Image (cartoon, rainbow, N blue to C red):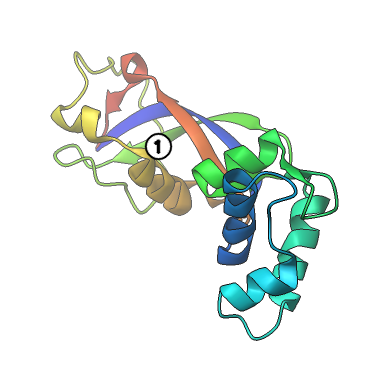
Amino acid sequence: MITVPILCRVAPAWSVGPFHWALLEALEVFPPGSRLPLPALADRLGLQRPRFLEEAWAELVRRHAVEGRDFLQADLAPTGREALRHGFGLSGPVQEHTRTLAFSAREGIPAAEPAPPTPPHTPPLAAPPRWAERLDRERVVAALASQHPELLPEGHHLLGFRVAWARAHAVS
């Protein structure tokens, strides 16, 4: 098993649902004054009731993803652009945490349990393992979920991570 400290940037976030996406996309594509009203847009999208779009619009206003309350005249706020680009919007402060994560030595598969303590005087790895370049967001999220679930509770998102390979160890 290989253990390695990883600095994680985590924040509470909201997911961009299909109705949010439709509204944000409409704001990006159509300039103010050239958009359909929400009931007409709902009809164009094949929705029986505009309530779904109206609720999504109210949520976008509440989350400051748009500038202005009137859909016909509003603009995308920077928060809305980021949400449209990434599929989620931040709803709280970004926090940084460093945790030691454990992976299988051969394949880099996240361990099911937290990393065991590193015995004293254990030298760090001479070089990162072969799988180091394949350590992506998906694997780090899986490792956090099984080893430190308190860092990614429901409604939180891993924004980025940095791996401290110089402090990685092989442990048994």
Tell me if 161 is positioned left or right of 19 in this view. left
**Residue depicted at x 53% and y 36%:** 159
Per the image, label 1 sits on a secondary structure element best described as strand
Foreground residue, 65 or 36? 36
Residue pushed farthest front? 34
Residue appearing at x 32%, y 22% in the figure: 168
Name the amino acid type tagged 1.
Leu
Along the horizontal axis of the image, is 15 left or right of 65? left
- Left of 160 or right of it: where is 31? right
Residue at the outermost right position:
69
101 or 57, which is in the foreground? 57
Q: Is residue 75 visible?
A: yes
Q: Kindly identify the residue that appears in the image at 36 percent across and 28 percent down.
A: 4
Q: Quadrant of the N terminus?
A: top left
Depth check, front residue: 91 or 81: 81
To which quarter of the image does residue 23 belong? Answer: bottom right
Q: Residue at x 25, y 46 (%)?
A: 109
Q: Is residue 151 visible to the viewer in this orientation of the structure?
A: no
Residue 149, image x, y percentages? 53, 51
Q: Is residue 19 above or below residue 85?
A: below
Q: How many marks?
A: 1
Locate residue 15, reporting x and y percent: 59, 56
* 83 on left or right of 65: left
Q: Position of residue 79 (x, y in %)?
A: 68, 38
Q: Is residue 123 above or below residue 18?
A: above
Q: Residues within 10 Å of mark 1 (few under 14, many from 20)?
A: many
On-image quarter of the C terminus: top left
Note whether 162 is above or below 51 in the view shown: above
Q: Which residue is mark 1?
A: 101
Which percent across, then down, holds residue 87? 52, 49
Q: Which residue is nearer to you in this view: 77 or 154?
A: 77
